[in-house]
């Protein structure tokens, strides 16, 4: 097997654990320390003062952040 | 080499008595010497057998290598939990994290639970370094309780009858988990031994998380059964 026939191991090893969450999921977060920087940038204050995280929005923003990096790595190939 | 030495040591201890009797019969050893050597042999044999019975914890490298698979599987559990919750009450859901603690031991004796595998929601903060290395003895917290009794347990900070686990915590542990309002801990069994504890925790109470709902508990228990594949009968060796 030459190099061109070898599978791309890096792509095989990527898991997509977030792809199976139901659509339209909104998470109520009482404790803001349970959010990472991405979560904090997306979370909105609800009427009762609790933070609400729209998971679809988080995933979309996460993809936005990954897309330029992926495009950059494709160019270098 | 280690196995060879173990076998050699066991044989020497086992036939030691025979040699003592032979040497005493030949007049090479006095009665008092034989008694003292006999006591020493008995103690050594007891220690050696205890060492064998206690088992051999795996290297910390083993759970580290299983981490990617285990974390992904736990993320699957979170997704399944939210799938159920979304069907049950579509409005909004509580923030829940998942972790698996494994028994860890120093010198095969001093055992405690420690977090090895985790999963959080996208946008959710991962477990802090402090949380990851915190030690939980048997009966400390709900995880320690589940480890000791081999039973699943529910904790709610506000409801009577669900807060007993909080009383067993040290000051440091209380500070760390003070923001948790509900927890569900399930023991992971393998070969008749509790080899780990699967924990779901939240900053929302039971009324929101529904950890006391039998359907939620069934989902979590199904995942706990399969997680035994990334746990170890004799636990993990302390680093």
Image (spheres, coloured by chain):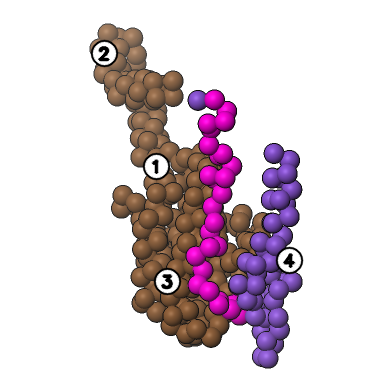
Chain colours: A purple, B brown
In the visual, does B71 lie left or right of B146? right
Q: Are dots 4 and 1 in contact, CB under 8 Å? A: no
On the image, the x and y values in percent for residue B44 come to 40, 30
Mark 4 neighbour class, 10 Å CA radius: few under 14, some 14 to 19, many 20 or more = few
Mark 1 neighbour class, 10 Å CA radius: few under 14, some 14 to 19, many 20 or more = few
Q: Which residue is mark 1?
A: B54
In the visual, does B172 lie left or right of B196? right
Q: Which residue is mark 3?
A: B153
Tell me, yes or no, whether dots 1 and 3 are on the same chain: yes
Q: Chain of mark 2?
A: B
Tell me where residue B2 sits by quadrant.
top left
Q: CA distance from mark 4 to mark 1?
A: 45 Å
Q: Which residue is mark 4?
A: A37
On the image, the x and y values in percent for residue A2 come to 54, 25
Of pointers 2 and 3, the one earlier in the residue sequence: 2
Q: Which residues are magenta?
A: A2-29
């Amino acid at each position: 097997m030459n190099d061109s026939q070898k599978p791309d191991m890096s792509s095989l090893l990527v898991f997509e654990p977030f792809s199976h969450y139901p659509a339209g999921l909104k998470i109520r977060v009482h404790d803001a320390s349970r959010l990472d920087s991405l979560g904090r940038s997306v979370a909105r204050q609800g009427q009762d003062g609790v933070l609400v995280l729209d998971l679809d929005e988080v995933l979309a923003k996460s993809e936005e952040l990954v897309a330029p990096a992926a495009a950059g790595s494709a160019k270098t190939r | 080499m280690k196995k060879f030495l173990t076998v050699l040591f066991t044989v020497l201890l086992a036939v030691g008595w025979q040699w003592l009797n032979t040497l005493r019969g030949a007049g090479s050893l006095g009665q008092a010497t034989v008694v003292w050597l006999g006591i020493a042999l008995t103690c050594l044999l007891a220690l050696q057998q205890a060492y064998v019975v206690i088992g051999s914890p795996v290297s910390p490298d083993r759970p580290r290598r299983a981490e990617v698979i285990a974390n992904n599987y736990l993320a699957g559990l979170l997704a399944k939990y939210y799938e159920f919750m979304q069907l049950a009450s579509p409005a909004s859901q509580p923030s829940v994290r998942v972790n698996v603690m494994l028994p860890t031991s120093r010198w095969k004796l001093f055992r405690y639970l420690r977090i090895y595998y985790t999963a959080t929601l996208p946008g959710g903060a991962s477990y802090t370094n402090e949380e990851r290395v915190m030690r939980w003895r048997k009966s400390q917290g709900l995880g320690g309780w589940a480890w000791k009794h081999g039973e699943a347990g529910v904790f709610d900070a506000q409801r009577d009858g669900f807060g007993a686990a909080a009383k067993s915590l040290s000051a440091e542990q209380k500070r760390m988990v003070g923001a948790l309002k509900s927890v569900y801990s399930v023991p992971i069994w393998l070969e008749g031994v509790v080899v780990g504890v699967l924990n779901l925790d939240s900053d929302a109470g039971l009324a929101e998380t529904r950890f006391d709902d039998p359907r939620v508990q069934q989902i979590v228990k199904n995942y706990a059964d399969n997680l035994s594949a990334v746990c170890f009968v004799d636990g993990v060796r302390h680093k």
